[in-house]
Every structure is written in structure tokens, then in C-alpha cells.
Amino acid sequence: MEFAEENSFMRKSQMAPPSRIPSPGKGLSEISESQGNARSKMSRLPAAAGVKHRMNGPLSEPDPKRKTLAERAGETRSVAAPTPNSRALVRTTSLVSAGKSMSNLGHHRNPSFTSSVSSSRTPSVSSRHTSNGSFSSSVGPGGRPQTSMSFNQSTAKRPVSGASKSRPATAMDNHYNDPAWDVHNRLEDVEAMYAELKQSMQSTSSERNGLEEAVSVYKARIAELETLRLQLSSANKTLQSDLDDMKLKADSLQQRLLTATTSLDDQMRAQRIEADEAKRSHRNEIDQLRRDNVDEVDRLLRLHRDELRELERKAAMELDDRLREAERRNEAKLEEERSRRLREVQELESKITSESQNLDLALQRKDREIQNMRGEIEDIRGELDREQTLKSNLQHSLDELKATSQKTLAETSSTIQSLESTVASLRARIHFLESGSKAQSDSFAEMEARLQEAVKSAEVSKQKLIKEETLRRILFNQVQELKGNIRVMCRVRPVFNAATEGEIAKLSYPDIDKESKELEILGKEEKSSLGNITRKTHSFTFDRVFGPESQNQEVFEEISQLVQSALDGYNVCIFCYGQTGSGKTHTMSSADGMIPRATHQIYETATNLKEKGWTYTMEGSFVEVYNEEIHDLLGNSKDLDKKKHEIRHDDSKKQTFVTGLKTVSLDSPDTVETMLKQAASNRSVAATKSNERSSRSHSVFILKLIGRNSTTNETSEGTLNLVDLAGSERLKQSGAEGDRMKETQSINKSLSCLGDVIGALGQGKEGAHIPYRNSKLTYLLQYSLGGNSKTLMFVMASPLEAHLTETLTSLKFATKVHNTHIGTAKKSTKVRERSSD
Ligand SMILES: Nc1ncnc2c1ncn2[C@@H]1O[C@H](COP(=O)(O)OP(=O)(O)OP(=O)(O)O)[C@@H](O)[C@H]1O
């Protein structure tokens, strides 16, 4: 706003800039000077015609060398005011000039003043012209416009002018020379001229007064303008100082802006660093959290599994205990009861025996008594017969005897009755004893019912276990997915003989005491353009790094979870990648390598899963991919390089078959050993034909696991592929020729295709083309790479300096694979390099 006002002020002041206003003083002095010049020139000019030209010159055409009024406006005013004389001398021209100036001024400043001046000037000029015209017509034939000044000069200077001698004769000269010169008339003329001149003088003086008045007005105007100029210059100064201030302010503002920008940059940099730091720490926290989660889930799973196992064990033990206890109790009870019953039976038997003996004795006695009685009766009858005569006498005795025998008979029958009742009571006793064994059988039934109950609760526990198993499978798969569907682990083989194997590379394991995920390798010496020798430290991070001391057992612990995934119905691929002699075969197919360990685990787990309703069938096949051809390592060794095998895919079931391949049903862990031996022998037969077959071909052990749960009707089909890749150093086409060249090209092609497939899978684009068909190896593993399948790559590293370049190449390839994530997101890592002198 301040600026705008100042600018408007400037604009206003420019409307009448001092430089454009003709300074009256200047104008006057200018005219005076020009008049003076004209005068001096006139004095030198020979002809009046020349005077006319010079008189008009300054008025009509300003000398181009002279400074303009505007230029002079800035100069110090040193011109002296014109003297009255000079004013008088130049008044005519001054009038014209002043008139013009005033006219100009008037145009710009004071129209009223201009009109007054011009109105007063015009008649005067016209009268002057008239007089000049009449004068000139009277004094010269040229009719030149003569000024009073020129007239005076010419009249004053004529007699003494040297120029008269040379100048051409004028009318005047003729008059002088004319003898008929009429002095009287001439005097009259002169008087008339004088009167006219006087009149002219008067009018001139009135004009002069007007002019003076104009000059005073003009001076006032000058003073005003001077004040204005001073004001303007002070305003200018103020503006200048304001401008300087503003410049200073602008400078300081610029400085502050610069400082602010720098500090903003610093702040932004600091914030960016902070953000990076926060991001890094956030990422670390997430990783830590994920790891913690995985550990926690692992721990929970372990706990859960332990608990389940404990529960199962407890339930089984409890069941066993209860059964045993029940049995024991029943047995004891039974034994007790039996012995009691036996005792009772024995007692009864002994009782019965003794009673029957008593009865027998009594019967014998009674029999004897009866015999005796019968003898007696016989005796009596004989006596009766003998004493029949003595009948009357003896009749009485006979009656008595009869009565006695009847009494004895009654007694005997009562004894028999009592014996019969004893037998009946004994029978009742036996019956009672028989009813005791019924109670026993009731207790058996009760025990049976309890047993059934226990069996039922065992069945419920079993169902619970089956459900828990399904849940475990889901949770387990989630844990595996959290760990990433593609994992890369590194294993460094030990140095076998430091004396013969040469220099050992500088490998270090920075976090060996913590997570064992990092590996650092000091690279080869490099010479810079300045001649400095440096060695780069290459840092790698994988899911796990196994040092030279690691054993196959330790390595297997890391992959056992993936083996479990195969049992749970997922496709799993475990690769070994690295140069020849780096330990691929040792890790994969040695006696305690991953293949035998995996199959052992599968047998064990499958057995444990039986009680959860799962039954598994396992089929194994072992193939070799050599020169882009499939060979059956379990087939006849003679057919190894001859028989053609084709890969076929069942897209609906997402399964792969190889035609003409021998498949072995693995019903015991020993079958695997036999299988591995046969594969190794087939390879060694092939090795006689072209050296080192194992390092020139890929071997793939395929284990198909088909599970069925009779309780839940669930099924699962998983495949475990254990792949021992060809030596990666063959990627170098180092002068290989013939068969070797073909092998090299095949290995090169299949390994780069494997990288391409993993890379394409890692991009995770739905429906994107995955180049499985580009090599036999990737085509064979089509359904075991990508999708829900899980992949683990072991990168094998040699610890020798001589193998350093190959080792670094392998580790860089593995890092690329590690940075790929299939299915679930995972942490990305980089190969870090730092130089050291
Ligand atoms: N971690 C290890 N511990 C002990 N010995 C090992 C280890 N790694 C490798 N070896 C031994 O080193 C030798 C070479 O290993 P191996 O044959 O496994 O290498 P490779 O990478 O399979 O080679 P190729 O590509 O020729 O098959 C073998 O004698 C093996 O037993």
C-alpha cells in the first residue's frame, strides 16, 4: 500500500515534471544568449538577409549541441538574471520567446496567463511587423524584417563600419548619395517613426510590465516548482532511504528466508531421518512382533500340543488306571467272594457230608434196629408161632410189640422227614449260594456299564482330539504363512583340511548368539583408479544362517515344520543351491540328510495321526533332470539315459505326473534307504559315462502324501519335493565344449528359469503369466511353486577364498529369492556393501 501510494505520488509528480517545464529564467537567459549571439553575429553579418535568417534560427531551430531545458533543470542555477538593457534589447524576441514559453507554460499550467500574454503579444507583434515592414520598405529594397536593434545598430554603426565598404549598396546608401534627399520629409518620417517607435516603446513597456508581471508570476511559479522540486527531492530522498531500508529489509528478509530455508531443509532432513528411523524401528518392531507372534504361536502350539499330549496321556492313563483298578477290585472281590463261597460250599459240603454220614449212621442204626426188630419180630413170630398157643397170653405181648414197632416206624419216618427237610434246607442253601453269584454278575454288569462310560468319554476325547487336530492344521498353516511362503536359509560347510584346501575366506556371523540370520563376507581386494586397495564387506541376511559347525539335525529342525505342512496337504519344495562341493548332497541325501529325516518324521507323525482318524499312503519317486530330459533314478540303470519320460499336468486336480516313472509305496522308513541307495547307484553308473553326474544334473525326490480321515471324512493330498540342484558354478561358460557345453547350457537355462519363475510369482499379479514351461525343472515343479505351496531354498556356501566369487554370486541370487514373497507379505532384505581399506 505504501509503495502504491508512493508510486501514485510519483505518477502525479510526473504529470508536470520539472524538467519539462521551461524555466523562465533559463528561457530568458537562453533567449538573451541567443539574442546576444544573434547580435554578435549580426554585427559580423554582411547582409540583412542573413540577419533575418539568424534571427529566426534560435526561435525555430534550437542548437542541437546545446543542452535541453530538461537537462539543464538539474544544473545549478548560475545564470544571472538578464539586465534591463538586454531585456530592452531583446524584448521583441523575448516577447515572442516568452510568449511561446508562456504559451507552453500556459498550456500546461496557466491558460489564463497565456491568453493574457498572447493577446497582448499578438497585436504588438503585428504592429511591430507593420512598423518593421514600413521601416524596411523605407530603408531597404530587400524588405527584410528589421528589428529596432538592427536598425539602431545599422544606423549607429554605419558610418564607421568597415563592412560597408565591402557590402553591396543599399537603398539607404543610395539615399545618402542621392543629392535629392529631402531632409524635411525625411525628418518627418523620422519623427513619425519616432512617434511610432515611442508608441511602440510604450506598448513595449506596457508589454514589459505585463512580462515582468508574468516573470514575477513565473518566478513565483518557479519558487513553487522549486519547493515542489525540493519536496520531490526530499520525497525522493525519503523514497530512496525507504527504498534503501526496504532493500535492507529485503536483504535481511532474504537472509532470514535463506536461514529459514536452510533450517527448514535441516528440519526436513532431520524429520526425514527421524521418519526413516521411525520407519526402520517400526519395521523392526513389526518384525520383532511378527517374530514374537510366530514364537508365541509356536510356543502356544507347543504348549497346546504338550497339553494335548498330556491330556491324552492322562486320559489314557486314567482310563488304564480305572480299568486296572476296576479289574483289580473286581478280581479281588471275585476272589474274595469265590473263596467265601468256596468256604461256604466246603462248609456246606462238609456239613452235608457229616449230616449224610450221620443220616447214614442213623439209617444204618435204624436199619440195624429194623433188622433187630425184624429179628425180634421173627423171634416174636417164632415165639408167637411157638406160643400161638400162648396166643392169648402172647397176643397182648404181640400188640405191644406191634405198637412198639409202629412207634419205631413213626420215629423212623419222622427221622426221614427231618432228613428230607435238611436236604431241602441244604438245597435252599445251595440256591442261596447260587443267588450270591447273580449279585456277583450284577456287579460285573455294573462294571461293564462303567467301562462303557469310560470308553464313551475316551471316544469324546478322541473326537475332541480330532477337532483339535483340524484346528492345529489351520493354525500351523497360518504360522507357516506368517513365516513366509518362500524362505531362504544359508549353510556354510566346514573346512575339511586347512592345509590342502588353501586360503580360507573371511566369513563372520554377527548375530550367531541371537537369531543367526546374518552373514558377512570380506570380498576380494579391489584397486581403485587412484591406486588405493580396498576390500568390500558384503552383508547378507536370510531366514537362518547355519555356520560350519551346524549338523544336519539342527538344519532339519528348521524344515520339519514344512514337512508337517506336506502332511497337512500342502505342496512343499525344498531346494539346495550352490556350487559343486558346497554340501548340497550332504545336506539333502546323506544318511542323516533331509530326505531320510523327512521320511522318518512323516512315518512318525502319520502313526500318531492314526489315533486321530488319519491314515496315510505315501508314494515316492526319484527323478533326475539332465540336459533338459527327465530320467528315472529308481528305474533300471540301463534305461537311465534311454527311456523317455513326459511331464503331464492335471489342471483340475492341480497334480503332476511323469509318464513311465517307477513309484515306490513307502510303507516303512527302511524303504527310503533302499530307494536312496538305488538312486545313488544309478547316478554312479551314469557318472562313468560323463563325469560327476550329480553336480551336472538336478535330482528331485518326490513324496506324495495322501491322507484320509475316516471320522471326519477329510482328505489331504500334499507333495514334498526335495531338490538337489546342479552345481551353480556351471553358469560360467568357461570354455566348455561339446557335451559339457550342452550340460552347461541346460543348467544355465534351468537355473535362470527357476529365478524367473520365483521372480514372476513374487510380483503376485493375479493371472499373470508364470514361465513354468521354459524349463523341465520348473514345469515339473509347477504345482509345487506358487499358490499355497511353500518353498525353502538352502543356499550352500564354501568357506574357501578360492570359491569367493562363486559364493558371492550364489548368495546374491539367494538374496533375490529371499526378497520375493509368495502369497503373504514378508520382510525385504538387501545385500549391504561397505568398503574398508
Ligand atoms: N556341513 C558339512 N559337514 C560335513 N561334511 C560336509 C558338509 N558339507 C559338505 N560336506 C562334505 O563335503 C563333500 C562335498 O559335499 P557334497 O557332495 O554334498 O557337495 P555338493 O554340493 O552336493 O556337490 P555336487 O554339486 O558335486 O553334488 C562331501 O564329502 C560332503 O560329505
Image: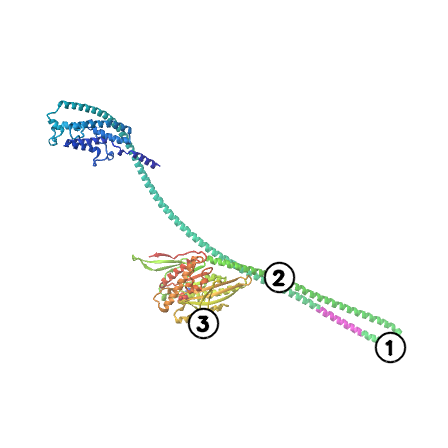
Q: Mark 2 points at which residue?
A: 450
Amino acid type at image mark 3? Asn
Amino acid type at image mark 1? Arg
Mark 1 residue CB less than 8 A from any atom of ligand 1: no
Is 541 placed above or below 134 here?
A: below
Image quarter of the C terminus: bottom left
Residue 87 appears in the picture as rendered: no
Q: Earlier in the sequence, mark 3 or mark 2?
A: 2
Q: In which quarter of the image is residue 189?
A: top left
Q: Earlier in the sequence, mark 3 or mark 1?
A: 1
CB atoms of marks 2 and 1 within 8 Å: no
Image location (x, y in percent) of residue 488: 43, 60
Residue 405 appears in the picture as rendered: yes
Which of discs 3 and 1 lies nearer the camera? The answer is 3
Magenta residues span 349-371
Q: Name the residue under label 1.
A: 386
Q: How crowded is mark 2: few (under 14 residues within 10 Å), some or many (20 or more)?
A: some
Amino acid type at image mark 2? Arg
